[in-house]
Amino acid sequence: MRSLRSRLTFWYTLVISGTLALVLMADYALLKRELVHGIDLLNAAEWSEIQEKLEHHPVSADALQEVILHSQIDARIYYFQIHDDTGQLLFRSQNLRHETLPFDAASPPNRTARLPQLGTLRIGLFHSGSLFIEIASSLKPTSQLLKTYTRVSLVMLVLVGALSIFLGSTLSRLALEPIHRIKNIADRIRADNLSERIPAPHGNDELAQLTRLLNQMFDRLEISFKQLQSFAGKASHELKTPLSVMRLQSEKLLLEGTLDPARQEALQQQLEGIIRLNSVIDKLLFLARAGVGVTPLQRQRTSFNGFINSFAEDALVLCEDQDVFFEICRNDVGTGFFDAALLHQVLLNLVANALNVSPKASHLRLFSETLAGCWRVSLEDNGPGLTPGEMTTVFEPFVRLCQHSTAEDGSGLGLAICRSIISLHQGRIWMENRTPGPGLRVVFELPVCET
Amino acid sequence: MRVLIVEDERKVGQFILKGLEEVGYSASWVRTSSEAHDALTGNPYDLAILDLNLPDEDGLKLLQQWRLNGFNHPVLILSARDAVQDRITGLNLGADDYLAKPFSFEELLARVRALLRRQAEIKAVVFEHRGIRLDLLARTAHLDGNAVELTAREFALLELFMQNQGRVLTRALIAEKIWDVSYDFDTNLIDVYMRRLRRKLESSDGKSLFKTLRGVGYQMT
């Protein structure tokens, strides 16, 4: 039972049905005792009737005769049996047929016995002079009554059980509704609508307190996000304004064309440095924002096929330029909800990295396939692959794998950006060495849109 | 053509002012939002260059106000803040183009011209330059009368250069117009495409069609 609602319903049903079952069982025991007691009283009443007659016939033989006579009158209701004080059986009423009531002069005055033909009987033992008279009544009507009681109780128990499941479920739904509302709103609050708050319920109950607590937490989160936004904005402004002036002036001097070749070369290098510095600033800001989820994504429903086609044109051009064969293997029917420009950048980055380590005339293979609920893209190269140590840090910022690479520059931020872009899309990215090698396989997976 | 520059940084503002005046525009430069407001109420401008980081008010608010007050001329946003976020907000609020700092003056000029031209001219559908004929409707390219096979990207790239003949196109502008990204690729993709275009459009006169300006971009000569 995963939900609180089903747990609450279960316990509610258990308590209600259990309590009812206990009450019914106690009632059953009480009823049974009272009914048997009633039979005892009837037996005793019969005895007092007989006793009254015996007072007029104190002589033992007469007394016996009197009891026998009485037994014949009430034979439909009572069973009679008479012993003398020596234990000898003097009389057995005819309705006992071939059976005998168990006799023990020392037994308690009322007891229950079961006879094979007559069923369960309640026997009262009475004493007058030298005679021991047993008067017994059948317990059949009583047990029938108790059986009916049990049947009715069971039906009631089932009905009450069903009713309590319904009531428990309804009550817990009502009780948990405010929590669901809070959950839904809290779920909706993300980086782009951090100013939304959960409407506080009236009063000061537990829910109102929880709501206030959550809203306070969102307040703090919003402030932190704003601080980060503001920091990124200010840092960007402070760094880029002087860069603008430097770039504009260097460019102007270069375009004027009045410099001697040595100075022109120096200035060109400076200009390239400025552009690279700007690119590093952009990437760092991107990583900082992506890390806290404030990067806006231009997500659109896009078909995997169309996206890969568009990318393939660029990949082919890059591979041709490096004399590397590019192949695509695909089975990618379906659509995703992603920022195509950013994913294009991820793939370009991966291809560029792979080309840096690919020998001439080697193959670069791109696999695009839709698996259960996800779209998997993998890129395989014929490069040297990675050591286990490199594998663990390869997506960290400023990690460079220089020993294999033929490229001179690169900020060491490319793969960190790739990972953050994939994470922003609720996907995952990893690398593995190909077996049999050598070669590296980079894989990323994104969720597929439900149709 | 009158251009209003709203830029609080003295050096950047002066540079743009001087640069625009050198190529023949009549430009005014103000440093605050209130000055910009006054300037716009008194004088007719054909275009405004607006920096978002102003000392007295956010540039985006100023832009919103302009649009509410009926200023319908193009506005080019200039910002050092996060390119993606501000770009989206700015364009949503009615800006016509966006340029991130640090920018190349050539790129600013190309964008200013494009914005002013957008208002005045009907877009050409056939371009001709140095023996190259590019037909945007038929999607065909010819060199000295012979058909040239171009991929979709190569065609788009050539179209961009044809529309901006003689102007320097920065890598950032090319990436934005062709691939719709404002990030650096970290690859030599643009250079590779330029090499291919050069190879395919090698003209008979032997002179290079595209000039590479290191650190800046490319120019169709």
Image (tube, coloured by chain):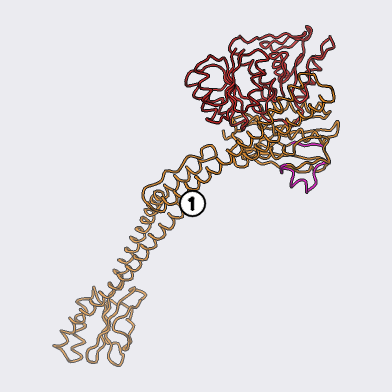
Chain colours: A orange, B red
Q: Position of residue A208 (x, y in %)?
A: 41, 50
Residue drawn at (24%, 78%) of the image: A43
Is residue A257 or residue B96 the one in the foreground? A257
Q: Is residue A58 magenta?
A: no
Q: Looking at the figure, which quarter contains the C terminus of chain A? A: top right
Which residues, given as a range, are shown in magenta?
A379-397
Q: Answer left or right for A171 relative to A73.
A: right
Q: Answer left or right for A152 relative to A11.
A: left
Q: Position of residue B84 (x, y in %)?
A: 61, 31
- Identity, as a three-letter code, of the amino acid under mark 1: Ser
For label 1, the residue is A3
Q: Position of residue B173 (x, y in %)?
A: 68, 23
Q: Is residue B139 visible?
A: yes
Residue furthest to the top in view is: B145
Residue A275: image quadrant is: top right
For mark 1, name the chain: A
Q: Position of residue B203 (x, y in %)?
A: 82, 11
Q: Is residue A447 visible?
A: no
Q: Is residue B79 above or below residue A83?
A: above
Q: Is residue A122 above or below residue B25?
A: below
The count of marks equals 1
Q: Is residue A95 above or below residue A212?
A: below
